[in-house]
Each structure stands twice: as structure tokens, then as C-alpha cells.
């Protein structure tokens, strides 16, 4: 009888031990056919970005002179080379394009620089339109969509889904609608974190930011401290020397001034080795 009692006691102990161990086990994984495979570590995020389509008639109508290269692109190719020399010598990556006021051709210059940099096959460039009060680059490139960079910077849309790729080494981040509170978005910690995440995922060599005019609002003033340098664009026969001087001093307080570009020049008589009049 004692042996029977001991056997039942041992069985009860063993059963209690098994139940305790079962409670500590991790939840059972779903069947293999329902498991989601993680993204392959070697996948290229650039290839996953939808490709942009530029209508041929826009090239001349919207002054996209750098799109096809050749002599017409000479001025922007020269600007590209001068810019790259400073970027490489100083270890810069983030470059802002700004102007004293609107109408200086800033967004057109950003588009042309993007196409010029795109012909440098060993460089990866991201162009982000941060002039959130208008469509800017989206109008120049005649692109439409549901979201804007404001949505990306607030974390509601992923950049890989919002961006549009030109060739294999240029990605545009465009605005398809105006934003009501651009200054607050651009100056937020969340926006900076999103930009750092974009850099970490895509690892660009250069990021061009088309930023708001300096003397119109405070939109860019809180953001420009986060770039490495900036180009100041002025319009020939439109932007006064006083406005250029004030804008340059404001810009120098926020970041490194890479240089001043006099845009919309009509008469240069080959002084810089070309007659296109865009630099």
C-alpha cells in the first residue's frame, strides 16, 4: 500500500512539474506558411522606390536644361562640380538651397542640380522639398500624389513609399499639397529624427534641401542649423544687393555659406566658358 501511495505521489509531483514548465514556455509560433519573412539584409532600398516619369515637353518648358546633359547643361554641371569640391574637402553631406525671396529660381536650380548629379553614376543623391507652403518641385516636374513631405516628417508616411526615383541614384521627396504649419514641423525634433532615419536607410552621398526663402517667414530659420552648408540663390536684375547682403548675413548665423549663385542671368557673353546664362 505504501508503494502505491508513493507512486501516486511521484506522479502528482511529475505532473505539477510539467504543468509549471508548460506555463513558462514561449507562445507557440504560427505555422511556417503564415510567418512573415523579414526583409533580406542585402535588399537595396533605392530599387524599391517608385520611378519618376518626366514628360518630354516639360524639359524645355520648365527649363530642365540639365536633364539630358550636353552643352545645355554646362552651367549646372559647373555648379555641380564646384559644389562637390567643397562637399568633399569639408566632409559635408546636407546642402540647403535658399533665397532672400521667392521667384529666384531656387526650385528650378534644385531640379537641374539633381539631374546633373544623377549623371555622376558613383553618387547617390536625395532631393527633398522643404518649402512646405507650396508644391514647388512637384509643379516643375509635373508630379501628383496623395501626400507631402510634411506627412513624411511627421511619421505618418514612409519616405520609401512617398519618394520618387530618377534613374538608379536620385530620389525626390516632393510636396503635393500646401501645409498649414510648416515652421512648427520643420523645427520639430520628430522631423530631424525622420531625416536621420532616411539617411540611415538610404545612405546618400548628398542630400539637397529646397528650403523656404529666408526673408518671407521663419520656416527655414529653425531648420537650417541642421544642414552642413547652404547655397544662396539670387535673381539677376531682380534681387537687390541690399537684400542679398541681409540674406547672406542671416544665413551665416545659421550655417556655413557655400556660396552665392546669381540665377536668371541673360547676358554673360561666354565669360564662364558657356552662353547658357544660368550660372
Image: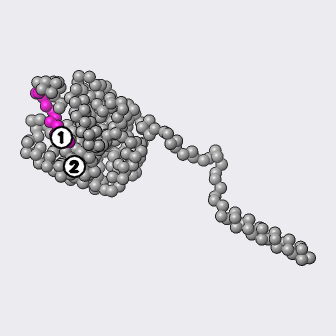
On the image, the x and y values in percent for residue 175 come to: 31, 43
Mark number, residue 88? none
Residue 73 seen = yes
Which of these two is toward me, 207 or 33? Answer: 207
Q: Which residue is mark 2?
A: 255
Question: Does 134 sit left or right of 204 as displayed?
Answer: left
Q: Quadrant of residue 46?
A: top left
Crowding at label 1, few (<14), some or many (≥20) Cα neighbours within 10 Å?
Answer: some
Q: Is residue 122 above or below residue 207?
A: above
On the question of residue 104 being in view, the answer is: no
CB contact under 8 Å: marks 2 and 1: no
Residue wearing tag 1: 259
Q: Residues within 10 Å of mark 2 (few under 14, many from 20)?
A: some
Give the residue at the far right of this rendering: 1
Q: Residue at x 24, y 45 (%)?
A: 229
In which quarter of the view is residue 231 placed? Answer: top left
Query: Which residue is found at the position 26% from the left and 40% from the top?
Result: 89
Q: Which residues are magenta?
A: 258-268
**267 is within the stretch colored magenta:** yes
The residue closer to the viewer here, 49 or 15, is 15
Tell me the SS state at disc 2.
loop
Residue drawn at (18%, 48%) of the image: 251
From what the image shows, is residue 279 above or below residue 163? Answer: above
| Pick the front one: 254 or 177 | 254
Amino acid at each position: 500500500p505504501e508503494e502505491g501511495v508513493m507512486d501516486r505521489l511521484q506522479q502528482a509531483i511529475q505532473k505539477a512539474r510539467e504543468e509549471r514548465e508548460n506555463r513558462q514556455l514561449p507562445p507557440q509560433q504560427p505555422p511556417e506558411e503564415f510567418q512573415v519573412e523579414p526583409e533580406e539584409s542585402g535588399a537595396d532600398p533605392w530599387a524599391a522606390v517608385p520611378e519618376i516619369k518626366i514628360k518630354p515637353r516639360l524639359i524645355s518648358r520648365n527649363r530642365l536644361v540639365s536633364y539630358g546633359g550636353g552643352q545645355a547643361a554646362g552651367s549646372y554641371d559647373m555648379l555641380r562640380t564646384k559644389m562637390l569640391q567643397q562637399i568633399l574637402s569639408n566632409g559635408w553631406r546636407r546642402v540647403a538651397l535658399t533665397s532672400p525671396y521667392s521667384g529666384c529660381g531656387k526650385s528650378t536650380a534644385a531640379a537641374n542640380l539633381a539631374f546633373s548629379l544623377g549623371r555622376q553614376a558613383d553618387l547617390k543623391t536625395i532631393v527633398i522639398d522643404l518649402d512646405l507652403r507650396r508644391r514647388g518641385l512637384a509643379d516643375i516636374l509635373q508630379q501628383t500624389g496623395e501626400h507631402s513631405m510634411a506627412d513624411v516628417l511627421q511619421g505618418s508616411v514612409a519616405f520609401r513609399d512617398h519618394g520618387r526615383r530618377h534613374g538608379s541614384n536620385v530620389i525626390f521627396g516632393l510636396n503635393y499639397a500646401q501645409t498649414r504649419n510648416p515652421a512648427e514641423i520643420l523645427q520639430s525634433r520628430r522631423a530631424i529624427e525622420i531625416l536621420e532615419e532616411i539617411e540611415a536607410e538610404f545612405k546618400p552621398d548628398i542630400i539637397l534641401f529646397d528650403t523656404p526663402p529666408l526673408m518671407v517667414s521663419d520656416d527655414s530659420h529653425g531648420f537650417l542649423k541642421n544642414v552642413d552648408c547652404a547655397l544662396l540663390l539670387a535673381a539677376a536684375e531682380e534681387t537687390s544687393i541690399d537684400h542679398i547682403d541681409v540674406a547672406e548675413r542671416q544665413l551665416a548665423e545659421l550655417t556655413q555659406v557655400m556660396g552665392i549663385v546669381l540665377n536668371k542671368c541673360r547676358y554673360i557673353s561666354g565669360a564662364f566658358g558657356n552662353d547658357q546664362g544660368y550660372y
